[in-house]
Amino acid sequence: MKKGLLGGITLGVIIVVTILCAIICIERVPVGYEGVVYSMNGGATGETIGQGWHLVAPTKKIKLFTIGNEQMVLTKDKREGSKGDDSFRVSTSDDATIAISFQMSYRFNSENLVDTYKKFKGMNGEDIVERRVKAVMKSKVSEVTTDYSLMDIYSGNRSEINNKITEYLDKEFGESYGMEVLDASIIDVHPDKQLRQTINNRVEALQKKQQAQAEQETAKVEAQTALIKAQNEAEIAITKAKAEAEANKVKAASITPELIQMKEAEARYKHGWITVQGADTTVVKDK
């Protein structure tokens, strides 16, 4: 009886210990993440595990890295991912600075997770983003915006600037942090009162310049039209004069002595002879 009770207790303890070990050793990798397995006494094992539930030895743990699309949002107002006023200032090619709201979609390259883990001495993906990426990202964005003027960033071709930022950050962060930058965008700009006045002055000057250029173009077109009209009229007059001269030439060539004699004979036959006699200009008509 005692042996049976002792055996039952022992079996129960074994089951409880087994269950506890299973609970302790089970690790869950969320959807969109991958885990780097590391040993508590030996560092990274070189092994990674995908999403789902995994049984991991008690002496091993995992560090999570996102391999799905994550979004970093740094805005002036509170939005998803932005805790408050996270806007930051960037420089421009005309020596101005302007505050921007910014967002970036990214993920870690799954092929480099172990190297990334080793490089940052055990930091997980979230720590790398919060403590390393954010610290340098503002200056990296500014390195791109310095190629563009204040007006380009405020109201120009924003899509071109965003494409350049995306390409640059993808290259820089890929080499430094093992990340892929899928999209990086300036989503809003926040000029202060003085800068807004500067922008308004530049907009007004640009509008005047565009109006002057339009007026100059109109005057140029009108002058070209008048010139073409004058050239056409001159060509018409020349053509008309040439035609008249040619007609006169043909007409003159057609008046021969024979034609003159014939016309004279026709006139004499019709009207007779007309002669002038004496100084008193008496006209005598002979039939």
Image: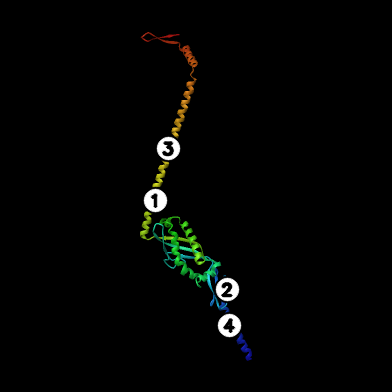
Residue 261: percent from left, percent from top = 48, 14
Residue 16: percent from left, percent from top = 58, 82
Mark 4, other Cα within 10 Å: few <14 / some 14–19 / many ≥20: few
Mark 1, other Cα within 10 Å: few <14 / some 14–19 / many ≥20: few
Image position of 256 with respect to 105: above or below: above
Which amino acid, by three-letter code, is at mark 3?
Answer: Leu
How far apart in space, not on screen, are marks 3 and 4 (Cα)? 103 Å
Residue 74 seen in the current view:
no
Give the mark nearer the N terminus: 1 vs 2. 2
Q: Which residue is mark 4?
A: 17
Give the secondary structure at mark 4: helix
Q: Which residue is mark 2?
A: 53
How far apart in space, not on screen, are marks 4 and 2 (Cα)? 20 Å
How far apart in space, not on screen, are marks 4 and 1 (Cα)? 80 Å
Give the secondary structure at mark 1: helix
Which amino acid, by three-letter code, is at mark 4?
Answer: Val
Which amino acid, by three-letter code, is at mark 1?
Answer: Gln
Give the mark nearer the N terminus: 4 vs 2. 4
Disc 4, disc 1: CB below 8 Å?
no
Q: Residue furthest bottom?
A: 2
